[in-house]
Image: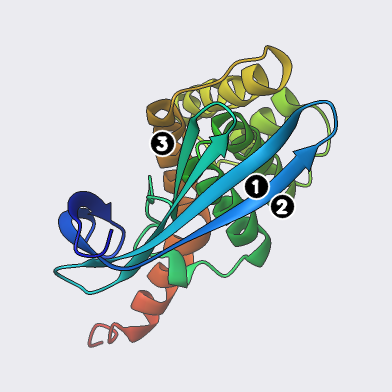
Amino acid sequence: MIGEKLSRYCNICRRSTLQESVFGYTSPIQVRFPDRFEGMVFFGYEAFKCSFCSSISMRVVAACSPGVQIYETWYPPEIIRHIPSWWGDLKDSEIKSLAEEVYSSLDHGNTRVAAMGIRTLIEHISEDKTGETGSFRAKIRALLAEGILNPAGSEILSTVLEFGHAAVHRKYAPSVQDVARALSIIENLIDQIYVIPPIATELKNNVPPRPS
């Protein structure tokens, strides 16, 4: 309903804000799924404007008949974990693409897919930096042998790897919070391996030499 006001998380403001409905439209559609469902679906579309940044989000409400079943979906979905501030300095396009798929999966509540994606990120990083193409354990050992990980880091990454294995092989559906924690560890690894070294090199080149 136009003029409706509600409090909802704003992806731009990164906090809950007051949002007001500025547009609304309802459309009935006759649908039929063989052996499953036949009836009317009433779709309600509403556009909400953030009172602080004026960004627009869309709420879609579907009411199914016969039998009242109501489904509510927001676009864009709430961002669970924003990309790091150093994302623009990451040059590896494959890692960027993989990680962004993980973020998207998390935002849509697909935590198992996100956990599998994190496991794939570990595999890619290891193969890229060590050339190791064997088992996941071999990949962790190769990162340790190359000095990319220290023993403590190896244990931490092994835990994250096991987290991904459980999602693939043990029907484990991790919580949003646990996926965000695993992402925090992977972000730290990516930052240390791919982002900080070139920044440090540039910084070194910009520092004037000591007088002789």
165 and 45: which is toward the camera: 45
Indicate the position of residue 111 as horizontal and vertical percent values.
54, 32
Q: In which quadrant will I find the C terminus?
A: bottom left
Which residue is found at the position 77% from the left and 41% from the top? 32
Element type at marker 3? helix
The disc at residue 156 is none
Seen in the picture, residue 61 relative to 141 is either above or below; the reply is below
Q: CA distance from mark 3 to mark 1?
A: 19 Å
Mark 3 residue type: Ala
Q: Could you tell me how many numbered marks the image carries?
A: 3
The disc at residue 125 is 1
42 and 56: which is toward the camera: 42
**In the drawing, does residue 152 fall left or right of residue 144?**
left
Which residue is found at the position 60% from the left and 16% from the top? 172
Choose mark 3 or mark 2, whichever is in front: 3
Q: Which residue is mark 3?
A: 180
Seen in the picture, residue 36 relative to 147 is either above or below; the reply is above
Q: CA distance from mark 3 to mark 2?
A: 24 Å
Q: Tell me which label, 3 or 1, sits earlier in the chain.
A: 1
Q: Tell me which label, 3 or 2, sits earlier in the chain.
A: 2
* Pointer 2 with pointer 1, Cβ within 8 A: yes
Mark 2 residue type: Asp
154 and 146: which is toward the camera: 154
Element type at marker 1? helix
Mark 1 residue type: Ile
Seen in the picture, residue 5 relative to 141 is either above or below; the reply is below
Q: Which residue is mark 2?
A: 128
Category of crowding for the residue at label 1, using alpha-carbon neighbours closer than 10 angstroms: few (below 14), some (14–19), many (at least 20) = many
Q: In which quadrant will I find the N terminus?
A: bottom left
Seen in the picture, residue 173 relative to 191 is either above or below; the reply is above
* Pointer 3 with pointer 2, Cβ within 8 A: no
